[in-house]
Amino acid sequence: MPGLTHTLDIARRAMSAQQSVLSVIGHNVANTNTPGYCRQVATLAQEVPSPWGAHGYGNGVSVESIQRRRDACLDHELRHDMTDLHWWETRAGKLSTLESILNEPSDAGLAAAMDAFWNSLSELSNDPDDMTRRASVREQGRQLAYRFQILITRTGQIGHNIDQEIQSCVEEFNLCLQDVQGLNIKIREAELRCVEANDLRDRRDVLLDQLCRFAPIIYSEREDGIISIRLPSSVILDEGIYRPLEAVVEEDADGQGRVTVLLPSGRAAEIEGGSIGALLELREETLPTYMEQIDTLAQAIITNVNALHGTGPARANFFAGTDAQDIAISPDIEDDLRNLNPSTSGMPGDNDIALAIAQLSHSRIMESGTMSPTEYWRSVVGRLGVDSREATFQQESLTLTTQSLEQRRTSVSGVNLDEEMARILVTQQAYMGAVKVLQAAGDMMDILLSI
Amino acid sequence: MRVSTGMLQETALNELQTVWSRLQKLQSNMATGRRIHRPSDDVIGSSHVMRASGNIRMAEQYKRNLAESRQFAMATESALVRLVDLADTIQMIAVQVADESYGPDSRGGLATELDGLLEEALGLANTSNAGMQLFGGFETREESYTADTDGEGNLVAVRRQGQGLDGELKRSVGENVLLTINLTGTDLFGEEQEFFKNLIALRDIARAGDCQAARDLVGTLLEDQDRINLAQAVTGGLLSRMDGMEEWLDHQILELEATRSEFEDLDMARASLDYQKEQAILQAALSATVQIMDLSLVQFMVR
């Protein structure tokens, strides 16, 4: 039969175990609002019993492990959706900016500027020799050219901003990657010493959450606790491997600086998701397409207006320049309004050129003779509307999905204060029980010693 | 499902954010009175709005062109009314000159009257409106009809000078609709200025007292009169067509504005009700959030 000291030991171990539990609860309560914190649970287990005579007597309780509550499958699912969400969110944001720049439908957009230009020519056709009307045509031409320039410059500015954003995203991505590398080592060291690295793992999970926002990373955890990360084309983090991305500014054919994201091998990183992927796609595909369409419209207007205007006696171009970037009123017209020719004959009442240019608004001069300039612009605006709508819709839908997944994750990992309070009460009671056992064993010991 | 304290806060914030976002959208719509601010708000709707707005701008320009053209045509009509009177008077005088009962003095008086009519007709041929010659074709700035006089100051010939005198002044009053708004000197006075030639001839006949020649001229003068009457009818027709065009443009603008309004304008009554509803939802959400945040075991344990 075990002696009183055995009972005292049981009470001591119980008090110690309950203290540990209370400590874990305290840690949970303290981190209720800590982002990425995963609630921990101290698992109690009974000690191996000791055989005394014909019976095996229990040795009380001890803390077997402190585990964090986390669902790795949910993490994978959520991170996958987060990558998609950030792709669409970044895209929606930039397309919304582009919509603001286009400023349609309104009375201050390109459509209104084109109409004002055609109408000024229509007005001139009513009295072709009137210098005031000619001046009005020149002014509306200037406004149209200015509108084109503003559109193309501001759209280009979005591209420039995107380059800067790519650089800072890559910088942030590399910092996270570096931190994951540091945590990998610490986690392995801790777990080799059989110490749970719960908090370190929490911090690493937060970093993984951040990394998947930038790019579609694929990660896996090895048995020793090291997480390896790769992009579809290359491993960027593993034991002894740390390959940060590189944002390199290169000059393109136009002499403009463009950022390219490279792997350390020098190959371009094929990133097709996350905010970096979206920024690269916008810079490489979407924005150039819209800029090209704006240029195409400007080119068509310059070419067709000049072709008609050039048949006048002055043989002068109306517009100078070749695209939306450099469209302007030609120096001939800027210098002398008499070089503005409303007619081929040059007679004061003749207006054939003015009428023909005004008619360009309805003429199918775009897309191989299938669209008028106004229709073409409407189709560009419509396409942007569809792209932006789709991006916003996907963003909203993915926001709901990720919110729901986030809730499921929090449901598993989050701290519930009420739950912790209830545990405190239970732990307190258990601790008091242990104290009572200790007290009783002590009293018995006193009685024994007083004999 | 297990509910964590963080979930409660997160859910409450997400829901509040959703309501705030809807309220912000409604507020923006109500402040502008429009429900489309950018193409992605309603892709099809914004395309309709852009088309309607563009067509309204064009139609308003066509109306302005039409107003100027009408002014020109009305000036032409006024000149023609007087020219018709002149042609009638000339015809009556021709009959009088052909009448043998008239003595030389009377014929002299008629010749003097014809001189006055000739000068008036010349003035009408050079009539301008808002600085534009009515009957000069493309020569809108300079007077195209000039008179030659003999040593005694008698008007002996009328000539046309300038280029493009038979040019048609075209005005754009609709998509691919061009309206010719002028009558040329040829339309009114003949290719070789027959009207003036015949008038001068009649005056000379009146002075000479050649009744037979006057009788011979009456038929030719009738042709001049017919030409002017025809020109007046053409101008009347033009003005009537302009009336029709203006009515059509007004109707078109009304329809386009209705289309634009249908797609772009906000249903204020509905928006106002939605706003009230969202406000009520927000208040309820805020109140529920405060209450649920207050319900915790911690509250009882710290007492």
Image (spheres, coloured by chain):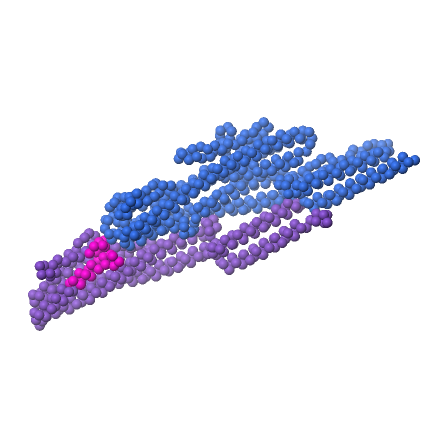
**Residue at the outermost top position:** A240
| Residue for point 18% across, 63% down | B120
The structure residue drawn at horizontal position 33% and vertical position 60%, both measured from the top left corner, is B246
Query: Can the viewer see residue A366 in this picture?
Result: no
Find the residue positioned furthest to the right.
A451
The answer to which image quadrant residue A83 occupies is top right
Tell me: residue B105, above or below residue B14. Answer: below
- Number of marks in the image? 0
Task: Name the side, left or right, on which B269 lies relative to A22.
Answer: left
Q: Position of residue A212 (x, y in %)?
A: 56, 37
In the figure, the shade used to draw chain B is purple
Residue A83 position (above or below residue B227): above
Q: Which residue occupies the foreground of this view, A231 or A31?
A: A31
The answer to whether residue A394 is left or right of residue A40 is: left
Instruction: Tell me the colour chain A is drawn in.
Output: blue
Vertical position of residue B7 compared to residue A174: above or below: below
Magenta part of the protein: which range? B118-143
- With B245 as the anchor, is A178 left or right in this view? right
Asked whether B111 falls inside the magenta stretch, the response is no
Give how far across and how far down residue A160 sits, in percent: 45, 38
| Image spot of residue B164 (x, y percent) | 21, 52
Viewer can see residue B185: yes
Q: What residue lies at 59% left-to-right and 36% top-to-bottom?
A: A207
> Residue at the location (25% across, 48% down)?
A344
Horizontal placement of B55 versus B33: left or right?
left
Task: From the top left corner, tell me how far across and down residue A177 is, in percent.
Answer: 57, 33
Q: Nearer the viewer, residue A124 or A403?
A: A124
Q: Quadrant of residue A445?
A: top right
